Image (cartoon, rainbow, N blue to C red):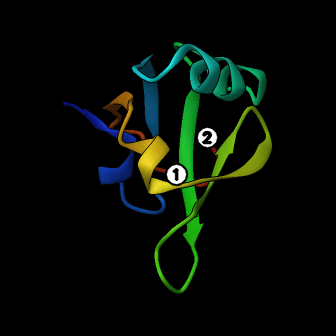
């Protein structure tokens, strides 16, 4: 199922399909390792739920919900903390 990253619950894997944001923001996310085909896992959120910490390519990064709404992902049935 294709959704935006902000809709993925903590502990559920997803695969990045595309990033629809300004060229600058897209490049910034790409530089942090968010590329098409990368597995991404929300691991925890702040008390206010913004930002959310995501594990991608073995690194945990924080992404604000505003940015996460521009990242299209496909959810996986392989939900596990070990896979991302």
Looking at the picture, how far across and down is residue 71, in whole percent?
41, 31
The residue nearer to you, when weighing 2 against 23, is 23
Residue at image location 56% in from the left, 13% down from the top: 23
* Residue 58, label in figure: none
Q: Are marks 1 and 2 in contact (CB under 8 Å)?
A: yes
In the picture of the structure, the residue carrying the numbered disc 1 is 80
17 over 80 or under it: above or below: above
Residue at image location 65% in from the left, 28% down from the top: 29
- Label 1: state its secondary structure: loop
Quadrant (top left, top right, bottom left, bottom right) of the N terminus? top left
23 over 16 or under it: above or below: above
Quadrant (top left, top right, bottom left, bottom right) of the C terminus? top right
Looking at the picture, how far across and down is residue 25, in whole percent?
60, 27
Residue at image location 49% in from the left, 20% down from the top: 22
Position of 71 with respect to 60 (left or right) is left
**Number of other residues with Cα within 10 Å of mark 1, as a class: few under 14, some 14 to 19, many 20 or more:** few
The residue nearer to you, when weighing 20 against 13, is 20
């Amino acid at each position: 199922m294709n959704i935006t990253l902000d809709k993925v619950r903590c502990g559920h894997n997803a695969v990045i399909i595309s990033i629809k944001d300004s060229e600058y923001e897209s490049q910034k996310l790409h530089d942090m390792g968010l590329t098409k085909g990368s597995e991404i896992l929300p691991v925890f959120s702040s008390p206010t739920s913004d930002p959310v910490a995501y594990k991608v390519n073995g690194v945990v990064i924080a992404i604000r919900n505003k940015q996460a709404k521009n990242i299209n992902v496909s959810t996986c049935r392989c939900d596990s903390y070990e896979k991302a």
